C-alpha cells in the first residue's frame, strides 16, 4: 500500500487502518530498540496536521476541520490511549497538533512510557477507522430470496 488516497485525516479512507497500524509497528520497533523507518508515523502526522481546524475568520471558524466521523474516531482513540476524557470540539485543533507533534519522533531517546501511549493511539486509530469503513457498504445483508428483474 502506498500513500493514502486523501491528504487529510479521513476515518473512512480505506488505507488509514493500514497507515495507523504500520505507524504503531514503527513505534514498537523503537520501544524494542530496533529503530528503523518512521515513514508511516510521518504520514499519519501529515494527515493529522492537514486536518487540524484553523481559524481564518469568524464566518468559517473551523475551515479544514475533520468531518464528524473522523473527529469521533480521533477523539475515541485519544481518550482510550491517553486514558483521558473526551476532547471537546473547541479543543480539537490543539489536540490534533499536539498528537501530530508527538508522532514526529525527534530521536530514539523518547521515554518508553510515551512511546507506549503513542503506539496505543496509533492502534486505536487503526481499529476505529477500520470499524467505520465497513459500516457504509455492509449495512444490510443480501436476501437470497429476493427476485431481481421483471
Image (cartoon, helix red, strand yellow):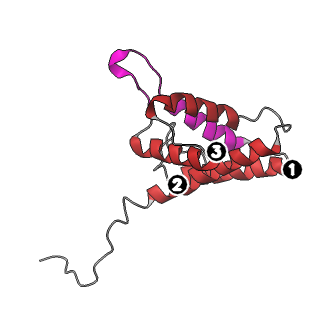
Q: Residues within 10 Å of mark 1 (few under 14, many from 20)?
A: few
How far is mark 1 from mark 3, CA to CA? Answer: 24 Å
Q: Please, what secondary structure does the residue beneath circle 1 have?
A: loop
Residue that label 2 marks: 128
Residue 61 sits inside the magenta stretch = yes
Is disc 2 in contact with disc 1, using a CB cutoff of under 8 Å?
Answer: no
Q: Residues within 10 Å of mark 3 (few under 14, many from 20)?
A: some
Apparent side of residue 101 relative to residue 135 in the rendered image (left or right): right
Residue 135: name its quadrant: bottom left
Q: Position of residue 88 (x, y in %)?
A: 47, 35
The extreme front residue here reads: 85
Residue that label 3 marks: 82
Q: Position of residue 117 (x, y in %)?
A: 70, 46
Query: Where is 23 relative to 147, above or below?
Result: above
Q: Name the quadrant of the C terminus.
A: bottom left
Q: Position of residue 104 (x, y in %)?
A: 71, 34
Apparent side of residue 28 relative to residue 138 in the rendered image (left or right): right
**Mark sitting on residue 34:** 1
* Mark 3 or mark 2, whichever is nearer to me: 3
Front one among 75 and 10? 75
The residues colored magenta run 39-65
Amino acid at each position: 500500500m502506498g500513500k493514502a488516497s486523501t491528504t487529510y485525516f479521513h476515518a473512512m479512507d480505506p488505507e488509514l487502518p493500514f497507515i495507523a497500524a504500520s505507524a504503531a509497528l514503527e513505534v514498537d520497533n523503537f520501544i524494542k530498540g530496533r529503530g528503523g523507518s518512521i515513514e508511516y508515523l510521518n504520514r499519519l502526522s501529515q494527515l493529522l496536521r492537514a486536518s487540524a481546524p484553523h481559524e481564518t475568520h469568524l464566518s468559517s471558524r473551523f475551515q479544514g476541520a475533520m468531518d464528524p466521523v473522523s473527529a469521533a474516531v480521533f477523539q475515541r482513540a485519544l481518550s482510550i490511549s491517553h486514558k483521558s476524557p473526551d476532547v471537546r470540539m473547541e479543543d480539537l485543533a490543539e489536540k490534533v497538533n499536539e498528537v501530530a507533534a508527538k508522532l514526529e519522533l525527534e530521536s530514539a531517546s523518547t521515554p518508553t512510557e510515551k512511546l507506549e501511549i503513542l503506539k496505543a493511539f496509533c492502534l486505536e486509530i487503526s481499529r476505529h477507522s477500520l470499524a467505520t469503513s465497513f459500516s457504509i457498504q455492509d449495512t444490510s445483508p443480501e436476501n437470497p430470496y429476493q427476485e431481481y428483474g421483471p
